[in-house]
């Protein structure tokens, strides 16, 4: 390994070292605040190191890594989301009895897994990343050991994720059998020569799609989502919805675009079908939910449905749209789960819609951020979600994907219906439930999220500029 | 820059009102009044010091917003938007004054929403960038939703949801149409932009134009509203607080009419001509059906809401007549309807404050108790039925004359609406102020504040009825500009156009 290789891997080294350091610190001295502070600093360091390696990209570390601006962008998004989740978790985890510091170890390992996916250029790293992520998530989801919900969600995720990993692995094996290589570039080269795909390769891709579809919670592989979202501690749900999905999306886009999957008729139809199904199933099932975490789970299914439209545009502008969409979706989702987190205590998780009754009159500040997040999910102007949806619709229409865009429009209206229901509750007459006090870190997170949603909604030009200028595959 | 200031002043006022509302319930009211008055004064000063010119746009400002997509912050003022702007500020001030006593809780947030809606509305009236237009179009929705949902009457939640879903769904159709238009224009000229002035005269196949136009129409016809799509209106109007009903009826509906004039007609000259017979038919159906339903209501507020449907029918009829005289009528009708229906809603609000019912059967004989209120009610009922001397008469007459030239049958049917209007308007006077006392209410007459508001409204409707020329002159260049394309088409191909307008020669009635 050369010096440059090391330089380019700095963010990963930081994220990988941090949990080890935390472990050592815990064994010497158990102090929640120290561990928390160290985690925040490490994530900040990892994030700022991205800027140092910017000049030396694109750089390939044979055969596993490819570090280009695209991957750095995703890396940045992943780290920022992890940071926001960390800030959110402070109070929530602090209240837990017994082990608390270990939470941050798991947070780092899962972030590491997610980060690896952003730079993977090889099936081995792809699989390593996904497994690191998943295994950390089992622990993460079941972190509240005293709650049966949490354990149930963890076990559910464990079983289903293992099955999906098996599919993924088998798919990779089939493709390896066909081409004798596991590197993305080499696979693309091997594919490029032949006209018809052999059944072996098609079933290989199909199996991989099952695995990836599971991680992204696309219909029909979405069954785990509501239960896991509901059972997991609220900040962990936020993590699953953002970091884990974003990372898988990163590798899916890279893989799909390298393969030019949108040119393949069958893949095109399959993805369209999955997208339309995800939108409709996600939104329609969300309508009847009384539990906000479940509702957000279904809404995330629909959102991933919107997002994979981008795969079919087959252009760099499409990729850029997807990055903007993900950034806005991350802020929005963290905002929504953040509010749930901050209003929950160890004894009581504020997850029913009634728990939010009249929140605006009691805690205007939290309610505003929540309203902004919901409006952003619904795609109403002044919020990031509006520009993001516009961007996707725009690129989709440019590529002529009218059927998909029209189902996206129909679904926006369906979605609006249930988001409005929550907003109405926020502004209805207050009930007299006790609400926990807000901490500094919680306030900071909400402020960051709320302001970002507004800025991206009103003045998105600069971010689009950056994305368009630097990101391409 | 003046146009941006107008919006910024309202936005700043909105936030200030919200912040101060927590400490002192009077401050938000004063702040809102001040912000709206400043805006009104700015625009009136502008009118006074500006000299008449032949320019298409009196003020035109264009800044980059999201240049990557060809989106700009393009605001411009012409006669039509000027008239609408003055109406907006005037009624904005009125709506603050009438809420003085009615809104007792969460005052700061109420005025925040109120000013935000008004900012959205003037944004709609000023935008010359289609993306920006959609942005403002949606921006008015959320605060209106809160206004109905928080300060409304019993069934407010359902009403506000219905309002939001209807308008949002139709708005999204318009959004798709806007983006389609953007690509159609971009592909044919290579210039990708949302700028209205560039998109004017986009060459496209007539079927494409028709489809895109339908997208725009969906949004405007729901807002207006046109009869099969009017379902949200009675609920929203009835459940909203008085200021909300006033703004909905007097201003929000006008954004639909404005959209027809500003976008449908100039952007799709031939497509809108081919839609004209349906458009006029929809107008006539709206006039008659709205009047019929208005007559059938026992809830006074709902009754007034349905008269809006009927009156806006005239607007659609006028827009799809495609001649100057009808367009003049449309402008007058928009303003007159804003004032007269607004005044009726205020009256209903005042009654409700006093006797806590809107049921027409429980009223009766109120003239004795409140003669001033009765007189005001009479004036605006007369305005609503189109009595000469009051604004609505001018509007409806001009529209009917214009429509007569375009389509005699439709015009005749529409004029039946005047009779229907007489029936429901007289019913208001009869059932509420005259007739038997069904319940012996204890109530006071109007207070000084209420009298002042009513006097202002009466003066404006009289002025509009007796001396409409300044308004007509102001709006005329803008209306002529709107019709240019239509004339070209009817010139070239008088038989090909399905509209029965027999070319230019009848369009000579000068005003």
Image (cartoon, coloured by chain):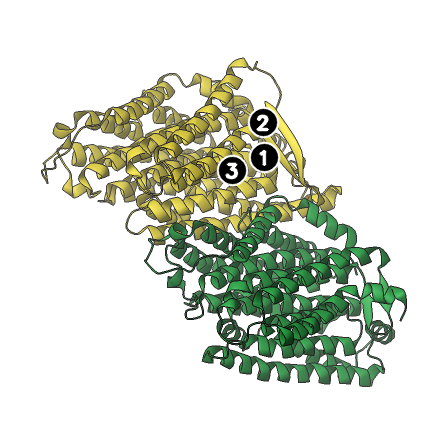
Q: Where's residue B71, x and y in %?
A: 66, 41
Q: Dot 3 falls on which chain?
A: B
Residue denoted by label 1: B266
Residue denoted by label 2: B481
Q: Nearer the viewer, mark 2 or mark 3?
A: 3
Is A278 situated above or below B344?
Answer: below
Residue A268 is left or right of residue A331, and the answer is: right
Q: Mark 2 vs mark 1: tell me if same chain.
A: yes
Q: Colour of chain B?
A: yellow
The mark nearer the N terminus, 1 or 3, is 3
Foreground: A80 or B375?
Answer: A80
Q: Residues within 10 Å of mark 1 (few under 14, many from 20)?
A: many
Q: Which mark is residue B259?
A: 3
Q: Where's residue B298, x and y in %?
A: 21, 44
Residue B345 is left or right of residue A376, and the answer is: left
Q: Which quadrant holds residue A65?
A: bottom right
Residue A298 appearing in the image? no
Residue B314 appearing in the image? yes
Q: Residues within 10 Å of mark 2 (few under 14, many from 20)?
A: few
Q: Dot 2 falls on which chain?
A: B
């Amino acid at each position: 390994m050369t010096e440059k290789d090391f330089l380019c891997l700095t963010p990963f080294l930081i994220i990988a070292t941090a949990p080890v350091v935390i472990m050592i610190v815990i064994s010497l001295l158990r102090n929640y605040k120290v561990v928390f502070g160290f985690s925040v600093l490490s994530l900040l360091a990892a994030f700022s190191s991205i800027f140092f390696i910017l000049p030396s990209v694109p750089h390939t570390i044979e055969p596993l890594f490819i570090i280009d601006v695209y991957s750095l962008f995703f890396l940045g998004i992943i780290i920022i989301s992890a940071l926001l989740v960390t800030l959110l978790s402070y109070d929530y985890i602090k209240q837990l009895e017994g082990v608390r510091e270990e939470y941050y170890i798991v947070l780092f390992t899962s972030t590491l897994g997610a980060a690896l996916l952003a730079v993977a250029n090889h099936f081995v790293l792809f699989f390593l990343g996904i497994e690191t992520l998943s295994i950390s998530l089992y622990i993460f989801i079941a972190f509240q050991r005293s709650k049966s919900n949490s354990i149930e969600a963890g076990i559910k995720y464990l079983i289903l994720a293992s099955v999906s990993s098996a599919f993924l692995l088998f798919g990779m094996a089939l493709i390896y059998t066909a081409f004798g290589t596991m590197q993305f570039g080499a696979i693309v080269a091997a594919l490029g020569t032949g006209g018809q795909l052999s059944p072996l390769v098609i079933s290989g891709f199909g199996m991989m799609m099952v695995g990836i579809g599971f991680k992204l919670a696309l219909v029909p592989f979405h069954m785990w989502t509501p239960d896991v979202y509901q059972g997991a501690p609220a900040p962990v749900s936020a993590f699953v919805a953002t970091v884990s999905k974003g990372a898988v999306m990163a590798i899916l886009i890279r893989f799909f675009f390298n393969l030019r999957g949108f040119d393949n008729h069958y893949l095109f139809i399959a993805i369209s079908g999955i997208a339309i199904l995800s939108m409709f199933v996600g939104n329609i099932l969300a309508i009847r939910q009384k539990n906000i975490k479940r509702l957000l789970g279904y809404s995330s299914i629909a959102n991933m449905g919107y997002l994979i439209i981008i795969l079919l545009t087959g252009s760099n502008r499409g990729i850029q749209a997807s990055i903007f969409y993900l950034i806005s979706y991350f802020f929005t989702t963290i905002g929504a789960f953040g509010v749930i987190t901050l209003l929950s205590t160890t004894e009581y998780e504020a997850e029913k819609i009634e728990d939010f009754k009249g929140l605006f009159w009691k805690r205007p500040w939290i309610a505003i951020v929540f309203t902004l997040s919901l409006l952003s999910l619904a795609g109403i102007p002044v919020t990031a979600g509006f520009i993001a949806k516009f961007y996707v619709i725009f690129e989709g229409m440019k590529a002529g994907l009218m059927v998909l865009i029209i189902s996206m429009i129909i679904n926006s209206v369906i979605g609006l219906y249930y988001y409005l229901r929550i907003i109405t509750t926020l502004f209805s007459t207050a009930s007299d439930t006790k609400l926990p006090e807000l901490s500094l870190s919680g306030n900071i997170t909400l402020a960051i999220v709320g302001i970002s949603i507004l800025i991206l909604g009103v003045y998105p030009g600069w971010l689009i500029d950056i994305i368009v200028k630097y990101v391409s595959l | 820059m003046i146009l941006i200031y107008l919006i910024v002043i309202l936005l700043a006022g909105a936030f200030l009102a919200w912040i101060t509302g927590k400490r002192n319930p009077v401050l938000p009211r004063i702040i809102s009044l001040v912000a709206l008055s400043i805006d009104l004064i700015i625009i009136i000063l502008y009118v006074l010091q500006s000299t008449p010119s032949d320019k298409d746009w009196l003020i035109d400002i264009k800044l980059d917003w999201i240049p990557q997509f060809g989106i700009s912050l393009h605001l411009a003022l012409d006669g039509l938007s000027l008239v609408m702007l003055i109406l907006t500020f005037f009624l904005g001030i009125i709506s603050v004054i009438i809420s003085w006593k009615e809104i007792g809780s969460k005052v700061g947030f109420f005025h925040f929403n109120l000013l935000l809606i008004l900012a959205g509305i003037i944004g709609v009236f000023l935008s010359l960038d289609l993306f920006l237009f959609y942005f403002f179009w949606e921006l008015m929705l959320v605060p209106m939703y809160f206004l109905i949902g928080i300060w409304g009457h019993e069934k407010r939640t359902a009403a506000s949801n219905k309002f939001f879903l209807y308008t949002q769904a139709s708005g999204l159709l318009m959004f798709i149409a806007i983006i389609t238009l953007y690509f159609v224009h971009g592909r044919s000229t290579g210039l990708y932009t949302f700028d209205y002035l560039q998109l004017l005269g986009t060459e496209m196949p007539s079927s494409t134009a028709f489809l895109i136009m339908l997208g725009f129409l969906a949004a405007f016809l729901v807002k207006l509203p046109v009869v099969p799509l009017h379902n949200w209106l009675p609920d929203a109007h009835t459940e909203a607080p008085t200021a909300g009903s006033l703004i909905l009826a007097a201003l929000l509906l006008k954004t639909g009419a404005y959209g027809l004039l500003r976008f449908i007609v100039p952007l799709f000259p031939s497509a809108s001509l081919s839609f004209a017979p349906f458009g006029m038919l929809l107008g006539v159906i709206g006039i008659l059906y709205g009047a019929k339903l208005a007559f059938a209501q026992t809830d006074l507020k709902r009754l007034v809401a349905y008269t809006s449907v009927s009156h806006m029918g005239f607007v659609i009829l006028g827009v799809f007549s495609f001649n100057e005289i009808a367009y003049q009528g449309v402008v007058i009708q928009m303003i007159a309807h804003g004032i007269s229906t607004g005044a009726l809603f205020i009256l209903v609000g005042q009654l409700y404050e006093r006797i806590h019912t809107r049921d027409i059967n429980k009223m009766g004989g109120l003239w004795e108790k409140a003669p001033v209120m009765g007189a005001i009610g009479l004036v605006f009922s007369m305005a609503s039925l189109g009595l000469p001397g009051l604004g609505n008469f001018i509007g409806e007459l001009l529209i009917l004359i214009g429509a007569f030239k375009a389509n005699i049958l439709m015009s005749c049917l529409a004029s039946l609406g005047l009779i229907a209007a007489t029936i429901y308007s007289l019913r208001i006077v009869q059932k509420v102020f005259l007739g038997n006392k069904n319940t012996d209410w204890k109530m006071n007459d109007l207070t000084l504040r209420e009298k002042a508001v009513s006097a202002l409204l009466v003066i404006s409707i009289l002025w509009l009825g007796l001396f409409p020329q300044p308004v007509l002159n102001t709006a005329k260049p803008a209306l002529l500009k709107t019709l240019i394309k239509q004339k070209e088409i009817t010139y070239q191909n008088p038989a090909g156009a399905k509209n029965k307008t027999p070319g230019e020669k009848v369009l000579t009635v000068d005003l």
